[in-house]
Image (cartoon, rainbow, N blue to C red):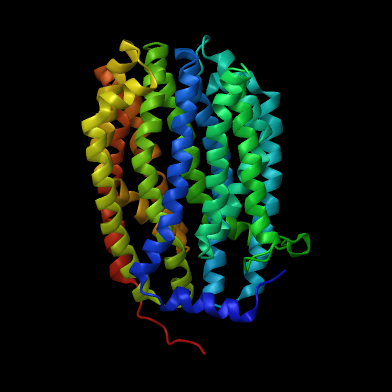
């Protein structure tokens, strides 16, 4: 079932005629909710698993690195195709948009199956590579099996979520992701404690919730609520289409892939100081991501607005939308960062009332909150460049936080400062990434061309 021409025209008018401040705000609300629910699920998962023991708590951080790999594949295809789809819709080229959507979906499905099979074949070596200590390894392996089984659903969910957002239908994406997250929170205590499955129950709960979430997102496309469709006959046979998706999605692949590498390096650096250090940094990562998630959600509200209007030649609207996002997102993250600074003791203690974990986790969380005041600068600047197809600049920006800035710091600072260096490596990287992003944002907003005349 395809949407009517009237609904297509109404969507075009909404995206190019509504004040951009209203559009960004409206579209950011569902994405922020989705990010918060996902993060709350991550925190709940960490909380329930942490009650099993310190080694089990450390396993959450290990498996989080694995999930980052799967998200890297999904976001590469989703962002890579989504921004191109939005620009095609802005240019009123619906057949091209549908071809891109089908190509991204089926390619992501194939990649998800491949990652699943390879990961299951080399499970234990993979867990060691991601930072498992001998005591954490049994927990991480049992948890990761279910994550790998759900890999195709996780990867395709990322694609569908991003296509919905770039079409301006973030509310549909929110429903699918939110329901999956809430289901996961409900299943965790049931499986872990009620059925006495321990960390195996946490993995099973995640796999089931990811499958349900993927099904809900797919139903939106099958019920004709979108302009994009998934049909095998629309799968592109032109290498150029795949190249464009991969190239435009490269910043997402790099960003998420570096997230996984960063998590691995952080786990290995913390492991030198024992399981409490791994557990503490895992909890800090999940807790501080709440702030980061709000910034990402607000930036995702910008993406469909900038892509659609860039494709339609409404460049002044792109500039205004970005400046509003920068002010709006920075204000929101500043409030959350302040709360985190003041409540660090309570937050860490709530997850693991272990003196060794608390001694490392509290100062580490405060350090991360300090850096989070500026996180929207590099987040929104990176998202803006990717959303309008400036993939080279977007790729450079994507490499900053967990690559160019973080990797040297996590290798150097612990050697110089011990565990303090482990705590401060990510906050310092975030600060540097924000500073380096400023010339990119200034160049972008000052070099946009004048608006093109509206087409009939």
Question: Looking at the image, which residue is at 45% across and 53% down?
Answer: 31
Direction from residue 43 to residue 80 in the image, left or right = right
Q: Which residue is situated farthest in the right direction here?
A: 233
Residue 40 is situated, as x and y percent measured from the top left of the image, at 44, 37
Q: Is residue 106 visible?
A: yes
Residue 239 is situated, as x and y percent measured from the top left of the image, at 68, 59
Q: Quadrant of the N terminus?
A: bottom right
Quarter occupied by residue 426: top left
Direction from residue 364 to residue 104 in the image, left or right = right
- Examine the rendered structure and indicate whether residue 326 appears above or below residue 197: below
Direction from residue 77 to residue 446 in the image, left or right = left
Residue 41 is situated, as x and y percent measured from the top left of the image, at 48, 35
Quarter occupied by residue 417: top left
- Examine the rendered structure and indicate whether residue 32 appears above or below residue 19: above
Q: Nearer the viewer, residue 441 or 190?
A: 190
Q: Which residue is situated farthest in the bottom direction here?
A: 456
């Amino acid at each position: 079932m395809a949407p009517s021409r009237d609904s297509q025209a109404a969507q075009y008018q909404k995206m190019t005629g509504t004040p951009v401040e209203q559009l960004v705000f409206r579209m950011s609300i569902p994405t922020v909710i989705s990010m918060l629910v996902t993060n709350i699920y991550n925190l709940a998962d960490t909380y329930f698993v942490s009650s099993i023991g310190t080694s089990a708590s450390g396993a959450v951080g290990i498996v989080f690195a694995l999930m980052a790999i799967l998200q890297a594949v999904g976001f590469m295809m989703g962002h890579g195709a989504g921004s191109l789809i939005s620009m095609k819709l802005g240019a009123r080229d619906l057949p091209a948009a549908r071809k891109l959507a089908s190509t991204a979906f089926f390619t992501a499905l194939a990649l998800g199956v491949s990652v699943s099979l390879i990961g299951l074949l080399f499970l234990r070596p993979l867990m060691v590579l991601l930072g498992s200590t001998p005591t954490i390894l049994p927990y991480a392996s049992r948890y990761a099996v279910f994550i790998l089984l759900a890999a195709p659903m996780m990867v395709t969910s990322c694609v569908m979520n991003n296509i919905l957002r770039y079409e301006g239908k973030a509310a549909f994406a929110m429903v699918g992701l939110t329901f999956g997250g809430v289901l996961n929170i409900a299943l965790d205590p049931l499986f872990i404690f009620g059925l006495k499955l321990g960390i195996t129950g946490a993995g099973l709960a995640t796999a089931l919730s990811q499958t349900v979430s993927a099904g809900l997102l797919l139903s939106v496309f099958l019920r004709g609520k979108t302009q994009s469709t998934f049909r095998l006959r629309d799968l592109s046979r032109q290498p150029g289409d795949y190249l464009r998706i991969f190239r435009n999605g490269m910043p997402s692949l790099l960003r998420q892939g570096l997230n996984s590498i960063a998590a691995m390096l952080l786990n290995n650096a913390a492991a030198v100081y024992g399981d409490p250090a791994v557990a503490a940094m895992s909890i800090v990562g999940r807790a501080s991501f709440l702030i980061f998630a709000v910034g990402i959600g607000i930036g995702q509200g910008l993406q469909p607005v900038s892509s659609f209007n860039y494709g339609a030649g409404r460049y002044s609207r792109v500039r205004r939308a970005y400046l509003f996002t920068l002010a709006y997102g920075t204000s929101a993250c500043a409030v959350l960062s302040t709360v985190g600074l003041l409540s660090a003791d309570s937050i860490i203690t709530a997850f693991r009332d272990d003196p060794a974990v608390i001694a490392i986790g509290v100062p580490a969380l405060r350090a991360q909150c300090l850096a989070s005041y500026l996180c929207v600068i590099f987040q929104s600047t990176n998202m803006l460049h990717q959303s309008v197809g400036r993939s080279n600049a977007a790729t450079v920006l994507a490499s900053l936080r967990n690559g160019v800035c973080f990797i040297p710091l996590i290798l150097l600072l612990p050697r110089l400062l011990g565990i303090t260096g482990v705590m401060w490596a990510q906050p310092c990287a975030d600060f540097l990434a924000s500073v380096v992003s400023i010339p990119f944002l200034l160049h972008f907003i000052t070099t946009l061309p004048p608006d093109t005349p509206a087409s009939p």
